[in-house]
Image (cartoon, helix red, strand yellow):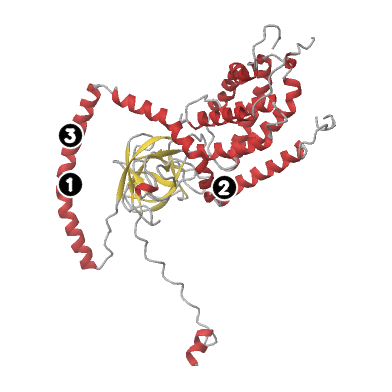
Amino acid sequence: MQPTHRSRRILLPVKMWFVFTTLFIALFLNYIPTGHLPAVPDFVALVLAFWCVREPVKIGIGAGFVFGLLTDVGVGAALGQHAFAYVLLAYAANELSRRVLWFTPVEQALHVLPLLFMSQVLMVLVRLLAGAEFPGWWMFFGSFVAAVLWIPLHYVLLLPQYQPVERDENRPI
Amino acid sequence: MVGHSPPPFFKRGPAPLAKLVFFLVLSLALLVSDLNLRYLEAFRKGLSVLSYPLQMAAATPADFVRNASNYFASLVRLQIENKDLKNKQLQGGERLLRLDQLEQENRRLRALLEARERQPVKSVVAEIMYSAKDPFSRKVILDKGTQAGIEAGQAVVDDLGVIGQITRVFPMQSELTLLTDRDQAIPVMIVRNGLRAVLFGAGNGLMELRYLAANADVQAGDKVVTSGLDGVFLAGLPVATVAKVERDQARTFAGIPCLPAAGVEQYGQVLVLGHREALPSRPPEPEVINKGKGRRARAARD
């Protein structure tokens, strides 16, 4: 199959303040006390994976570590639990970005799903080794919900980059 | 992937793999020191300065939902609750009337026996706001914190018995670890025969009496109360009821699951008990007599 060159679509360069704003909004969503409600997606993991795929040069492991620690503190998890998972997630997403960007959003979501799932499995393993109770299988459902959210997220987070500086009917941007 | 990455045209810091290893080791070190050694409470407090405003903002929708559901609680339910409460008050009233007199009598008797008086403890009423999001533990967040004088380690009870212990405090909130959490233990005794034991959370909403011999005198239905040996919980607070006793010859200890007496997994008002006065220190170990060769003997001679 011929590549569609979707990733070659000319976009405005991303603004770093926008990246960090979205990450903080995701952090805010993670902090909402939903208790033990099943299938609540990990928003920080999702947005972090998005920017790691989209901007592998600018966003990566360091951001994953910092936002992992912030999630740990806010959620009341063991310190380093989310940081550990997000660092690996960021690395894998960075490595995958050259491949993933050729696909349509739906196919991209299918690529990201295993990454999100892996980060959850890692967290469960770490906590089980430390002697915590198994939270139940429903918790893994969260990464599937997150993968579905990837598709709308793809349009929402890229929206500012689709806005040209000045409107020009003859330019295909 | 590692071997096939293109040569770096632009300088961008250390290689991704080196960075990955560095941060992985760092987060693993944090994990170990937090879970096993518990060194990082100060670090966590520092980070929570950053996360706290966001947390408070994120709790607002939850508060709103809670208040809205309270607001729309039906009249019928409130009437039923009111009737129940009146009944309870009537039942308790008679006992309360006798309590004053009993306390007086107890104090006099204790004075006669020269026993330590049971000190009254200061307590704070708090409300459970929501359960913490960490799915691996059973913790809830209370709406009072250091500003209300709450400290880590305090015991928390509701109207039926003990529900847990404060493990972390923030300025306006505190984190309460429920008795059913896997890491929570509480020294107890069985009312019927005064047998001392330790009750652990089992994680599935139950608790478990561990390290009791297979032939220990425990029966299903036994009431379990705090023994007060830890110096944290007051003695005699109801904790649990023995659900059943599994005596297996193959194992050294009996398996004794217990049902919590209080509404451990419920929401509502709770009472945070103040710190108890410290227990008298342990009697010193008997000194080994060393025939006048020790330092003390020499000092006495000089």
| Residue B122 point in image, percent of width and height | 29, 52
Mark 2 falls on what kind of element?
A: helix
Q: Residue at x 50, y 85 (%)?
A: B296
Q: Residues within 10 Å of mark 3 (few under 14, many from 20)?
A: few
Task: Please name the amino acid that badge 1 sits on.
Answer: Leu
Question: Label 1, on which residue?
Answer: B96
Q: Is residue A147 left or right of residue B188?
A: right
Picture layout, residue B215 above or below residue B21: below
Q: In which quadrant is the N terminus of chain B drawn? A: top right
Q: Looking at this view, is B20 or B187 the one in front? A: B20
Question: Label 3, on which residue?
Answer: B86
| Residue B295 point in image, percent of width and height | 53, 84
Q: Residues within 10 Å of mark 1 (few under 14, many from 20)?
A: few
Mark 3 falls on what kind of element?
A: helix
Q: Which chain contains the residue that carries disc 1?
A: B
Picture layout, residue B179 above or below residue B117: above
Does the CB distance between marks 3 and 1 fall below 8 Å? no
Specify the quadrant of the image occupied by residue A61.
top right
Q: Which chain contains the residue that carries disc 2?
A: B
Task: Please name the amino acid that badge 2 sits on.
Answer: Asp
Label 2 – label 1 distance at C-alpha: 46 Å
Q: Which chain contains the residue that carries disc 3?
A: B
Q: Looking at this view, is B117 or A3 the one in front? A: A3
Label 2 – label 3 distance at C-alpha: 47 Å
Q: Is residue A111 left or right of residue B38?
A: right
Label 3 – label 1 distance at C-alpha: 14 Å
Picture layout, residue A161 above or below residue B103: above
Task: Please name the amino acid that badge 3 sits on.
Answer: Lys
Eye-nearest disc, 2 or 1: 2
Determine if marks 2 and 1 fall on one subunit.
Answer: yes
Question: Label 2, on which residue?
Answer: B34
N-terminal of the pair, mark 2 or mark 3, is 2
